[in-house]
């Protein structure tokens, strides 16, 4: 068995790769490590709406309690809610059961520490070592030493109030459409916007355990685009399954991704004197247009690897208070320790109100260069070999020479899926797509599943 934790926790097809047995072992090992073998750790557990959530939740809780840990079940709540509430309940850790934007058959387990940050790599390694060794011996936790499990009733209202505390304006008369992806935000997002007085239309808010992310949410904003235009809304917001991402649709039905949100919110924070050292944090995937727009605003851009984990690590080192990804993960470090789609949308609303402009007018100020992204599905065991392969490198160099001076090539392995992502940026969309497929095809031929 390979290593368990990727860039966003443990993930796989539920009950096949991520089994109840593995969830139990993760709970047991995490409880032992975080309890240091000598105290009763407290774990929060939250989940999204996918059908396997309860299966994994109960297995994980059983593992935690078998080694003396206590469990507080939060029920269905966004990932960022768990990260925020872990401090309120003075827990040792918060666990989220979700596979984010993936389809319903997948699920995942990611763990936050007692301060709401993702677990340190060294702690994850200790947990992995215990699981993979299959020789875990622990003292007998019997009688009064067995852990307990309890639900709470105030988690939703606490998180809702936390979100409302991040905005100091009313939204009366404002038309907003929300697409909650049949996921973890299906109750909280409408509740927050209605409390602010907005005229709210909600899409994809009837989860059945199977329809999470299904042709909806941040990865499929088409329905949201149509509805915004149909009802004459001022703006539309789409979240993913665990609600840590945000994609915006403007008043004309045009999609604004995380790069737009970074630019618009970065400009707002600078004008308010709240942008530390006049810089933001972005990833290597961020569009060239972000850098050019920020340069005009007098804002510098720190660049880091793809993944909100790496964005946050960079922000903590540099003091940056705003960071994010093109995919819609936004971190407003003055408010939260992880991506939060609903909070990000509230900050975006503040920026639009401060500008006095329509969302489309703000978006049109940012020139986004064409990009093409092609996913090459590969055998997970050969991701690194594929990246280092001489034939693949030669083909990349061939395309880079073609784009020299007008674009770039970025090849990176997915941290959560058996994919190598081939991204090209330049001037001609059709040519970029063809060149991306040219590279991807070779990767698939040499390292795809046989």
Image (cartoon, rainbow, N blue to C red):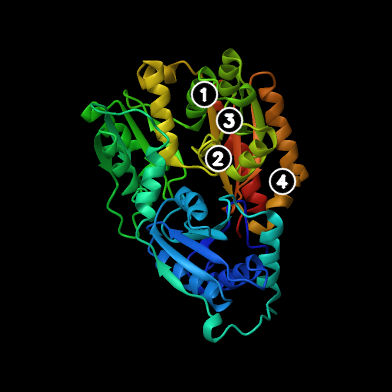
Name which of mark 4 and mark 1 comes first in the sequence: 1
Tell me what residue is drawn at x 45 percent, y 65 percent.
Answer: 72
**Residue of label 3:** 286
- The mark closer to the camera, 2 or 3, is 3
- The mark closer to the camera, 4 or 3, is 3
Rendering coords of residue 85 (x, y %): 47, 52
| Residue contact between numbered discs 4 and 1, judged by CB atoms under 8 Å | no
- Residue 426: mark in rendering: none
- The mark closer to the camera, 2 or 1, is 1
The quadrant of the picture occupied by the N terminus is bottom right
How packed mark 1 is, by other alpha carbons closer than 10 Å (few <14, some 14-19, many 20 or more), is: some
**Residue of label 1:** 269
Rendering coords of residue 239 (x, y %): 40, 42
The quadrant of the picture occupied by the C terminus is bottom right
Q: Secondary structure at mark 3?
A: loop
Name which of mark 4 and mark 3 comes first in the sequence: 3
How far separated are the C-alphas under marks 4 and 3?
21 Å
Q: Secondary structure at mark 1?
A: helix
Where 376 sits versus 277, above or below? below
**Residue of label 2:** 374
- Residue 387: mark in rendering: 4
Q: Is residue 321 left or right of residue 365?
A: right
How packed mark 2 is, by other alpha carbons closer than 10 Å (few <14, some 14-19, many 20 or more), is: many
Rendering coords of residue 371 (x, y %): 54, 29
């Amino acid at each position: 068995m390979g290593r368990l934790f990727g860039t966003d926790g443990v993930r796989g097809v539920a009950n096949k790769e991520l089994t109840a047995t593995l969830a139990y072992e993760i709970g047991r090992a995490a409880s032992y490590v975080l309890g240091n073998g000598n105290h009763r750790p407290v774990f929060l557990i939250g989940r999204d709406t996918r059908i396997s959530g309860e299966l994994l939740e109960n297995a994980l809780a059983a593992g935690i309690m078998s080694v003396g840990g206590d469990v507080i079940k939060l029920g269905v709540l966004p990932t960022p809610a768990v990260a925020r509430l872990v401090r309120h309940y003075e827990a040792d850790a918060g666990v989220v059961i979700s596979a984010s934007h993936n389809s319903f058959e997948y699920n995942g387990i990611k763990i936050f520490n007692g301060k709401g940050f993702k677990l340190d790599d060294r702690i994850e390694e200790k947990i992995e070592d215990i699981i993979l060794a299959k020789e875990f011996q622990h003292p007998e936790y019997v009688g009064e030493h067995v852990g307990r499990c309890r639900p709470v009733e105030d988690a939703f209202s606490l998180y809702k109030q936390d979100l409302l505390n991040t905005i100091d304006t009313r939204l009366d008369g404002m038309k907003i459409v929300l697409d909650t992806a049949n996921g973890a935000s299906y109750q909280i997002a409408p509740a927050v916007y209605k409390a602010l007085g907005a005229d709210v239309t909600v899409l994809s808010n009837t989860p059945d355990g199977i329809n999470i992310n299904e042709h909806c949410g941040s990865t499929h904003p088409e329905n949201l685009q149509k509805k915004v235009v149909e009802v004459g809304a001022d703006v539309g917001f789409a979240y993913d399954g665990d609600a840590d991402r945000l994609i915006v649709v403007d008043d004309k039905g045009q999609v604004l991704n995380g790069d737009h949100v970074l630019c618009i919110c970065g400009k707002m924070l600078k004008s308010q004197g709240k942008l530390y050292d006049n810089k933001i944090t972005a990833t290597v995937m961020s569009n060239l247009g972000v850098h050019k727009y920020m340069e005009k605003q007098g804002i510098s851009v720190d660049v880091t690897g793809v993944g909100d984990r790496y964005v946050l690590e960079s922000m903590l080192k540099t003091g940056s208070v705003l960071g994010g990804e093109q995919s819609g993960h936004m971190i407003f470090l003055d408010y939260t320790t992880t991506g939060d789609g609903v909070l990000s949308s509230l900050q975006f609303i503040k920026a639009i109100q401060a500008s006095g402009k329509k969302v489309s007018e703000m978006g049109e100020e940012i020139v986004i260069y064409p990009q093409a992204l092609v996913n090459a599905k590969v055998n997970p065991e050969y991701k690194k070999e594929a990246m280092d392969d001489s034939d693949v490198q030669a083909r990349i160099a061939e395309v880079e020479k073609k784009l020299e001076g007008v674009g770039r090539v970025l090849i990176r392995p997915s941290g959560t899926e058996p994919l190598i992502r081939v991204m090209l940026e330049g001037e001609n969309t059709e040519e970029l797509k063809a060149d991306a497929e040219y590279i991807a095809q070779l990767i698939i031929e040499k390292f795809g599943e046989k």
